[in-house]
Amino acid sequence: MVWKRTISSKALEKARYASVKVEDKVIFIANVNGTLYGIDAVCSHARCILGELNAQDLTVKCYCHHAVFDLRTGSMIEPPYVAKDAPKEKLGLKTYAVKDNNGWIEVDV
Ligand code: FES
């Protein structure tokens, strides 16, 4: 495990979610009622940055063509509207362990 510091816990708690650069990756992190999630922020369809958190469904939507991903598993729930027939299982995203370490959000990369 290689934990990397990102943003302060307070900043994430206030914003609820953020895309952070960690080494050569961009990771979408979210705090949903105190539970932390991390998922690749670069969409597997056409490499847009993910952006819209749905805290009730624990999903995140890509702004570009509205693909929806499960925060817990990285699975694609809804395909991009421009590629409805794309194989969802191949377009899933990697998820990451996220923790609060003394007021800092850390991601295991
Ligand atoms: S780039 Fe994300 S759905 Fe197309």
Image (tube, rainbow, N blue to C red):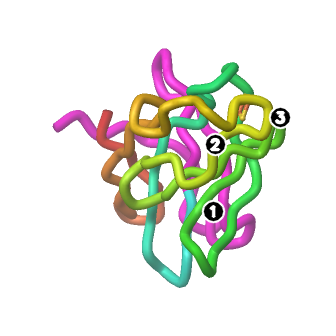
Percent x, y of residue 44: 56, 27
Decide: few, some or many residues near mark 1? Use Cα within 10 Å; few <14, some 14-19, many ≥20: some
Task: Say above or below: 44 vs 60.
Answer: above
Disc nearest the viewer among 2 and 3: 2
Q: Bounds of the magenta span? A: 1-29
Position of 32 with respect to 93 (left or right) is right
**Residue at the image position 49 percent from the left and 39 percent from the top:** 88
Residue at the disc numbered 3? 64
Which residue is the extreme one toward the right?
64
* Disc 3 element: loop
Q: Which of marks 3 and 2 precedes in the sequence?
A: 3
Q: Is mark 2 within 8 Å of ligand 1?
A: yes
Distance in Å between CA atoms under marks 2 and 3: 12 Å
Q: Secondary structure at mark 2?
A: loop
The image position of residue 109, as x and y in percent, is 32, 33
6 in relation to 36, above or below:
above
Which residue is under mark 1?
12
Residue nearest the observer in this picture, 63 or 35: 63
Judged from the image, the secondary structure of the residue bearing numbered disc 1 is: helix
The amino acid type found where label 2 is placed reads Pro
Which residue is tagged 2? Answer: 79
